[in-house]
Amino acid sequence: MGLAKTEMFTDEQNEISLFAKVFGHPARVAILQHLFKLDSCICGDLVNEIGLAQPTISQHLKELKQLGLIKGNVEGTSVCYCIDKTNWLHMKKIMIQFLDQDISNKECC
Amino acid sequence: MGLAKTEMFTDEQNEISLFAKVFGHPARVAILQHLFKLDSCICGDLVNEIGLAQPTISQHLKELKQLGLIKGNVEGTSVCYCIDKTNWLHMKKIMIQFLDQDISNKECC
DNA sequence: TTGTTTCATTGTAATATTACGATTAAATAG
DNA sequence: CTATTTAATCGTAATATTACAATGAAACAA
Protein backbone atom coordinates (compact mmCIF):
# COMPACT_ATOMS: atom_id res chain seq x y z
CA MET A 1 0.00 0.00 0.00
CA GLY A 2 2.93 2.36 0.53
CA LEU A 3 0.78 4.20 3.04
CA ALA A 4 1.78 4.45 6.69
CA LYS A 5 -1.05 3.98 9.19
CA THR A 6 -0.27 7.15 11.11
CA GLU A 7 -3.48 7.04 13.16
CA MET A 8 -2.21 4.14 15.26
CA PHE A 9 0.90 5.99 16.43
CA THR A 10 1.52 8.86 18.82
CA ASP A 11 1.98 12.41 17.58
CA GLU A 12 5.58 12.19 18.73
CA GLN A 13 6.24 9.01 16.76
CA ASN A 14 4.70 10.53 13.66
CA GLU A 15 6.66 13.75 14.05
CA ILE A 16 9.96 11.91 14.47
CA SER A 17 9.29 9.81 11.40
CA LEU A 18 8.37 12.85 9.32
CA PHE A 19 11.60 14.62 10.22
CA ALA A 20 13.61 11.47 9.64
CA LYS A 21 11.94 10.85 6.31
CA VAL A 22 13.08 14.20 4.96
CA PHE A 23 16.66 13.30 5.89
CA GLY A 24 16.19 9.94 4.20
CA HIS A 25 17.59 11.10 0.87
CA PRO A 26 21.27 11.99 0.37
CA ALA A 27 20.41 14.97 -1.86
CA ARG A 28 18.46 16.62 0.96
CA VAL A 29 21.28 15.89 3.40
CA ALA A 30 23.71 17.47 0.93
CA ILE A 31 21.48 20.53 0.46
CA LEU A 32 21.27 21.09 4.20
CA GLN A 33 25.00 20.61 4.72
CA HIS A 34 25.64 23.11 1.93
CA LEU A 35 23.30 25.66 3.51
CA PHE A 36 25.09 25.22 6.82
CA LYS A 37 28.54 25.51 5.27
CA LEU A 38 27.96 28.77 3.42
CA ASP A 39 28.01 32.05 5.27
CA SER A 40 25.69 33.58 2.73
CA CYS A 41 22.55 32.18 1.19
CA ILE A 42 22.84 30.12 -1.91
CA CYS A 43 20.42 30.13 -4.79
CA GLY A 44 20.50 28.09 -7.96
CA ASP A 45 24.09 26.98 -7.53
CA LEU A 46 22.75 24.00 -5.60
CA VAL A 47 22.01 22.55 -9.02
CA ASN A 48 25.70 22.86 -9.91
CA GLU A 49 26.96 21.80 -6.50
CA ILE A 50 24.83 18.65 -6.44
CA GLY A 51 24.65 16.78 -9.72
CA LEU A 52 20.88 16.56 -10.08
CA ALA A 53 18.60 18.33 -12.55
CA GLN A 54 16.98 21.63 -11.63
CA PRO A 55 13.43 20.29 -11.22
CA THR A 56 14.75 17.55 -8.96
CA ILE A 57 16.57 20.01 -6.69
CA SER A 58 13.51 22.23 -6.66
CA GLN A 59 11.41 19.28 -5.58
CA HIS A 60 13.78 18.42 -2.71
CA LEU A 61 13.85 22.07 -1.62
CA LYS A 62 10.07 22.06 -1.55
CA GLU A 63 9.99 19.12 0.85
CA LEU A 64 12.50 20.76 3.16
CA LYS A 65 10.45 23.95 3.03
CA GLN A 66 7.17 22.17 3.73
CA LEU A 67 8.64 20.76 6.93
CA GLY A 68 9.82 24.25 7.83
CA LEU A 69 13.51 23.39 7.99
CA ILE A 70 14.50 25.95 5.35
CA LYS A 71 13.20 29.32 4.18
CA GLY A 72 13.28 30.77 0.69
CA ASN A 73 13.47 34.41 -0.26
CA VAL A 74 13.08 35.78 -3.80
CA GLU A 75 15.95 38.05 -4.88
CA GLY A 76 15.44 39.24 -8.39
CA THR A 77 15.28 36.26 -10.69
CA SER A 78 16.92 33.94 -8.19
CA VAL A 79 15.83 32.55 -4.85
CA CYS A 80 17.87 32.61 -1.67
CA TYR A 81 17.52 29.66 0.68
CA CYS A 82 18.67 29.24 4.23
CA ILE A 83 18.12 27.18 7.36
CA ASP A 84 15.13 28.20 9.48
CA LYS A 85 16.91 28.54 12.79
CA THR A 86 13.89 28.25 15.11
CA ASN A 87 12.39 25.23 13.41
CA TRP A 88 15.75 23.50 13.07
CA LEU A 89 16.34 23.80 16.81
CA HIS A 90 12.88 22.39 17.52
CA MET A 91 13.50 19.46 15.21
CA LYS A 92 16.95 18.92 16.71
CA LYS A 93 15.51 18.73 20.21
CA ILE A 94 12.95 16.12 19.22
CA MET A 95 15.37 14.00 17.25
CA ILE A 96 18.15 14.08 19.83
CA GLN A 97 15.66 13.14 22.53
CA PHE A 98 14.79 10.08 20.45
CA LEU A 99 18.41 9.18 19.68
CA ASP A 100 19.57 9.76 23.24
CA GLN A 101 17.36 7.26 25.03
CA ASP A 102 19.01 5.53 27.94
CA ILE A 103 20.69 2.42 26.63
CA SER A 104 22.40 1.11 29.76
CA ASN A 105 21.83 -2.56 30.65
CA LYS A 106 19.28 -2.99 27.91
CA GLU A 107 21.24 -5.47 25.82
CA CYS A 108 20.33 -9.10 26.37
CA CYS A 109 20.82 -11.09 23.15
CA MET B 1 12.48 6.61 -10.86
CA GLY B 2 12.28 6.10 -7.09
CA LEU B 3 16.01 5.39 -7.12
CA ALA B 4 18.44 7.67 -5.30
CA LYS B 5 21.65 8.42 -7.20
CA THR B 6 23.92 7.49 -4.32
CA GLU B 7 27.09 7.60 -6.39
CA MET B 8 27.02 11.38 -6.56
CA PHE B 9 27.03 11.84 -2.78
CA THR B 10 29.63 11.32 -0.08
CA ASP B 11 29.74 8.18 2.05
CA GLU B 12 28.73 10.31 5.00
CA GLN B 13 25.69 11.74 3.22
CA ASN B 14 24.60 8.27 2.16
CA GLU B 15 25.09 6.87 5.64
CA ILE B 16 23.07 9.65 7.25
CA SER B 17 20.24 9.17 4.77
CA LEU B 18 20.19 5.40 5.32
CA PHE B 19 19.90 5.80 9.08
CA ALA B 20 17.28 8.51 8.68
CA LYS B 21 15.29 6.43 6.24
CA VAL B 22 14.88 3.62 8.74
CA PHE B 23 13.47 6.12 11.24
CA GLY B 24 11.17 7.44 8.52
CA HIS B 25 8.27 5.18 9.50
CA PRO B 26 6.34 5.58 12.77
CA ALA B 27 6.12 1.82 13.27
CA ARG B 28 9.90 1.51 13.38
CA VAL B 29 10.11 4.47 15.75
CA ALA B 30 7.53 2.78 17.96
CA ILE B 31 9.39 -0.53 17.87
CA LEU B 32 12.65 1.12 18.92
CA GLN B 33 10.99 3.12 21.70
CA HIS B 34 9.41 -0.08 22.98
CA LEU B 35 12.76 -1.89 22.96
CA PHE B 36 14.28 0.99 24.89
CA LYS B 37 11.45 1.15 27.39
CA LEU B 38 11.54 -2.50 28.42
CA ASP B 39 14.21 -3.68 30.80
CA SER B 40 14.03 -7.16 29.38
CA CYS B 41 13.93 -8.36 25.83
CA ILE B 42 10.66 -8.37 23.99
CA CYS B 43 9.46 -11.05 21.65
CA GLY B 44 6.27 -11.28 19.66
CA ASP B 45 4.29 -8.89 21.79
CA LEU B 46 5.30 -6.10 19.43
CA VAL B 47 2.43 -7.24 17.24
CA ASN B 48 0.00 -6.63 20.10
CA GLU B 49 1.72 -3.45 21.25
CA ILE B 50 1.66 -1.89 17.79
CA GLY B 51 -1.48 -2.46 15.78
CA LEU B 52 0.02 -3.88 12.61
CA ALA B 53 -0.16 -7.42 11.24
CA GLN B 54 2.56 -9.90 12.14
CA PRO B 55 4.22 -10.00 8.69
CA THR B 56 4.35 -6.21 8.66
CA ILE B 57 6.09 -6.05 12.03
CA SER B 58 8.46 -8.78 10.91
CA GLN B 59 9.31 -6.77 7.83
CA HIS B 60 10.05 -3.63 9.88
CA LEU B 61 12.18 -5.65 12.30
CA LYS B 62 14.16 -6.99 9.36
CA GLU B 63 15.00 -3.49 8.17
CA LEU B 64 16.14 -2.44 11.63
CA LYS B 65 18.24 -5.59 11.84
CA GLN B 66 19.80 -5.09 8.41
CA LEU B 67 21.04 -1.68 9.51
CA GLY B 68 22.43 -3.28 12.65
CA LEU B 69 20.37 -1.22 15.09
CA ILE B 70 18.74 -4.26 16.71
CA LYS B 71 19.72 -7.86 17.35
CA GLY B 72 17.49 -10.93 17.43
CA ASN B 73 17.95 -14.06 19.46
CA VAL B 74 15.87 -17.21 19.13
CA GLU B 75 14.43 -18.47 22.43
CA GLY B 76 12.35 -21.55 21.92
CA THR B 77 9.51 -20.73 19.57
CA SER B 78 9.82 -17.02 20.14
CA VAL B 79 12.49 -14.49 19.21
CA CYS B 80 13.97 -11.92 21.55
CA TYR B 81 14.92 -8.57 20.08
CA CYS B 82 16.96 -5.79 21.60
CA ILE B 83 18.92 -2.68 20.70
CA ASP B 84 22.47 -3.29 19.46
CA LYS B 85 24.29 -0.99 21.84
CA THR B 86 27.51 -0.52 19.87
CA ASN B 87 25.85 0.15 16.55
CA TRP B 88 23.27 2.44 18.11
CA LEU B 89 25.98 4.59 19.63
CA HIS B 90 27.79 4.77 16.30
CA MET B 91 24.60 5.83 14.54
CA LYS B 92 23.84 8.34 17.27
CA LYS B 93 27.24 9.96 16.90
CA ILE B 94 26.81 10.38 13.14
CA MET B 95 23.25 11.68 13.36
CA ILE B 96 23.90 14.12 16.19
CA GLN B 97 26.94 15.46 14.34
CA PHE B 98 24.64 16.19 11.42
CA LEU B 99 21.89 17.71 13.54
CA ASP B 100 24.29 19.76 15.63
CA GLN B 101 25.90 21.82 12.89
CA ASP B 102 26.73 25.37 13.87
CA ILE B 103 23.71 27.48 13.08
CA SER B 104 24.80 30.91 14.37
CA ASN B 105 24.43 33.88 12.02
CA LYS B 106 23.48 31.68 9.12
CA GLU B 107 19.96 32.97 8.72
CA CYS B 108 19.51 35.59 6.02
CA CYS B 109 16.02 35.39 4.55
C1' DT C 1 4.11 -39.08 15.78
C1' DT C 2 0.64 -34.97 15.51
C1' DG C 3 -0.73 -30.51 17.01
C1' DT C 4 0.49 -25.87 18.47
C1' DT C 5 2.92 -21.74 18.78
C1' DT C 6 5.87 -18.24 17.00
C1' DC C 7 8.03 -15.90 13.62
C1' DA C 8 10.01 -15.51 8.74
C1' DT C 9 9.15 -15.55 3.90
C1' DT C 10 6.57 -15.23 -0.38
C1' DG C 11 3.56 -12.95 -3.36
C1' DT C 12 0.99 -9.08 -4.48
C1' DA C 13 -1.95 -4.82 -4.52
C1' DA C 14 -1.99 0.00 -3.37
C1' DT C 15 0.52 3.92 -2.78
C1' DA C 16 4.80 6.87 -2.48
C1' DT C 17 9.18 8.48 -4.11
C1' DT C 18 12.61 9.87 -7.36
C1' DA C 19 14.17 11.96 -11.44
C1' DC C 20 13.76 14.74 -15.40
C1' DG C 21 11.92 16.81 -19.95
C1' DA C 22 8.77 20.24 -21.05
C1' DT C 23 6.57 24.14 -19.79
C1' DT C 24 5.23 28.16 -17.10
C1' DA C 25 5.88 32.29 -14.28
C1' DA C 26 8.26 36.16 -12.64
C1' DA C 27 11.89 39.39 -12.61
C1' DT C 28 15.35 41.84 -15.16
C1' DA C 29 17.98 43.60 -19.28
C1' DG C 30 18.10 45.50 -23.58
C1' DC D 1 7.95 45.85 -26.13
C1' DT D 2 11.19 41.43 -26.63
C1' DA D 3 14.78 38.56 -24.95
C1' DT D 4 17.03 36.30 -21.09
C1' DT D 5 17.58 34.25 -16.69
C1' DT D 6 16.04 31.68 -12.77
C1' DA D 7 13.24 28.71 -10.45
C1' DA D 8 8.58 26.51 -9.83
C1' DT D 9 5.22 23.35 -11.67
C1' DC D 10 3.29 19.68 -14.61
C1' DG D 11 3.35 15.21 -16.43
C1' DT D 12 5.18 10.82 -16.40
C1' DA D 13 8.25 6.65 -16.26
C1' DA D 14 10.91 3.79 -13.22
C1' DT D 15 11.48 2.15 -8.83
C1' DA D 16 10.59 1.75 -3.74
C1' DT D 17 7.67 1.21 0.22
C1' DT D 18 3.90 -0.43 2.92
C1' DA D 19 0.65 -3.76 4.37
C1' DC D 20 -1.21 -8.22 4.69
C1' DA D 21 -3.09 -13.00 3.36
C1' DA D 22 -1.11 -17.27 2.62
C1' DT D 23 2.39 -20.24 3.44
C1' DG D 24 6.63 -22.22 5.38
C1' DA D 25 9.93 -23.43 9.01
C1' DA D 26 11.50 -24.33 13.54
C1' DA D 27 10.89 -25.38 18.32
C1' DC D 28 8.11 -27.44 21.65
C1' DA D 29 4.13 -30.17 23.85
C1' DA D 30 1.36 -34.08 24.18
Image: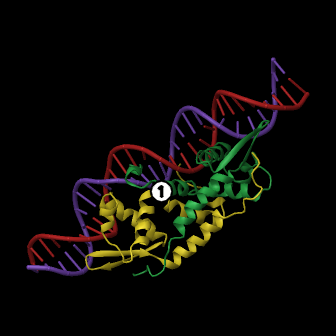
Chain colours: A yellow, B green, C purple, D red
Q: Position of residue D26 (x, y in %)?
A: 73, 29
Q: Amino acid at mark 1?
A: Glu
Choose between B49 and B62: the one closer to the eye. B62
Q: Is residue B72 left or right of residue A57?
A: right
> Which one is in front, B108 or B23?
B108
Q: Which residue shows up at 72% across the image and 62% down it? A: A102
Disc 1, SS: helix
Query: Relative to residue C3, is residue B91 depicted above or below?
Result: below
Quadrant where the C terminus of chain A sits is top right
With respect to residue B73, does D10 lie above or below?
Answer: below
- Can residue B27 be seen here? no
Picture quadrant of residue A100:
bottom right
Instruction: Measuring from the top left, give residue A104's x and y in whole percent.
Output: 75, 59
Image spot of residue B57 (x, y percent): 65, 47
Give the total of numbered labels: 1
Question: Residue C23 vs residue A5: left or right?
Answer: left
Q: Is residue B72 visible?
A: yes
Instruction: Categorize mark 1 by other alpha carbons within 10 Å: few (<14), some (14-19), many (20+).
Output: some
Observer-nearest of B9 and D17: B9
Q: Residue at x 48, y 80 (%)?
A: B104
Q: Disc 1 is attached to a residue of which chain?
A: B
Q: Quadrant of residue B38?
A: bottom right
B1 with respect to B44 (left or right):
left
Q: Position of residue B70 (x, y in %)?
A: 66, 49
Residue at image mark 1: B12
Answer above or below: position of C18 versus D7. above
